[in-house]
Image (cartoon, rainbow, N blue to C red):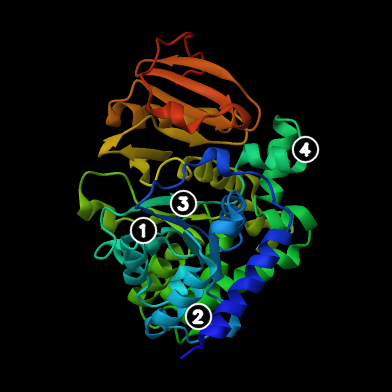
Amino acid sequence: MIRESVIAAVAAKQKEHVLARAGGLPRLEKLRAAPAGFAWIISGVRRCGKSTLMEQFLRQAPDEAFYLNLESTALAGLSLEDAGRLDRAIGATGAKTIYLDEVQTLAGWERYVRTKLDEGFRVVATGSNASLLGRELGTKLTGRHVDTELFPFDYGEFLAFTERTPGADATRAYLAAGGFPSYLATDDERILETLFADILERDVALRHAVRDIAGLRRLAAWLVENAGGKMSAQRLRQPLGVASASTLLQWAEHLADAYLFSFLPKFSPSLRVQLVNPRKIYCIDTGLQCALSATNAPDESRLFENLVFLALRRRFRDLAYFEGDGRECDFVAVAGKRPLDPVQATVALNEDSEEREVTGMRAAMAALGRRRGWIVTVGEEDVLSVPEGEIRIVPFHAFDPAAIGEAAPVAKRENGSGT
């Protein structure tokens, strides 16, 4: 049990600190808050800016706001049994909007939020687990919530924060630094190392009661080094010293739930095909990859592929890779079970890469029935006409993921690459 006076004192101090902090890079203009009667649930990896976004919203009407970060050590042990005391602390402030930061800390939080909505409050909540947008909302908040996934800074936000001009040089800077605001503000890699350790300990090991923490760390380190490659749990079991492949798969699911890694299936309408084929690995941030890599110079092509993945993931939740007849294409976004334009990622097109990238793209276009594909590079731009349709080669700074679902225009130039 936590006393009402403690809850009230913690909330008042936290709100004072929030209002005293600098506002950070504005992100509200990109998002729409939930309408009245709906909870606004903001989820994403730790330190990506969820709290800052909440604080920017809070500043619009601070006198009507009650703010509480549930991860405060002073609130350790807070439970729904304390709901009455929390209610009285909120009531004493006259607040109309309740802000609950890191809400997953409170077991059964969905029931509490539903109650406050029914009482006429507006509720904004953040959390560091993807499951906040899934099964944990399914029973108590069905039809009563609006979801937002937040990621580290995208390319445009990186440019604004670092005051850079878009182009190949800025793309390479973004590739190396990533988008975590606190790292960009300090250039101190220890911030990323500590963040990685915190996610493993608090959002994975503690939340999911993982006992073999050393094994979990070995898996996470392997995934960092192999982002852009494929994972086979059965083959990894012995090298990582883990008892079973099922344990590795469970850990991978927990890491994905914490937004640290994503695992893309092979594109197929068959669920069985998706399940039996290895998944491709991607990390939440390329700056994190660089900071944690055991090598001084991580593979640039893998990093760039990860960067393009993140640009797509911010727009689409369902992504897969294409593989068929020995040819591969990096990404296929799916909207309503309908595949969109395939996307390849390569640092540059040259004699070694062009034939591979174009033939893989053509195979994907033919199999998916798409008349257009995209090859994203660091700085090249062109249009190729192929029998399957049109391949657009675009620099990363000009690539708009929203365009891959639009109708394909007429191809403009014949491909002279011999493919």
Residue 304 x/y as whole percent: 60, 43
Cβ–Cβ under 8 Å for marks 3 and 4: no
Tell me the amino acid under the disc marked 4.
Glu
Could you tell me residue 84's position as x and y percent? Answer: 40, 80
In the structure shown, which secondary structural element does the residue marked by tag 3 occupy?
strand
- For this rendering, which residue is in front, 191 or 387? 191
Residue 410, horizontal then vertical, whole percent: 40, 9
Rendered view: 92 above or below 350: below
Q: Could you tell me how far apart the alpha carbons at marks 2 and 4 are, in whole angstroms?
A: 41 Å
For mark 4, what is the residue? 163
Q: Earlier in the sequence, mark 3 or mark 4?
A: 3
Give the spatial CA distance, label 1 vs label 3: 25 Å
Which residue type carries mark 3?
Answer: Glu
First in residue order: circle 2 vs circle 4: 4
In this rendering, position of residue 399 left or right of residue 144: right
Give percent across and percent down for residue 172: 71, 40
Neighbours of disc 2 within 10 Å: few (<14), some (14-19), many (20+): some
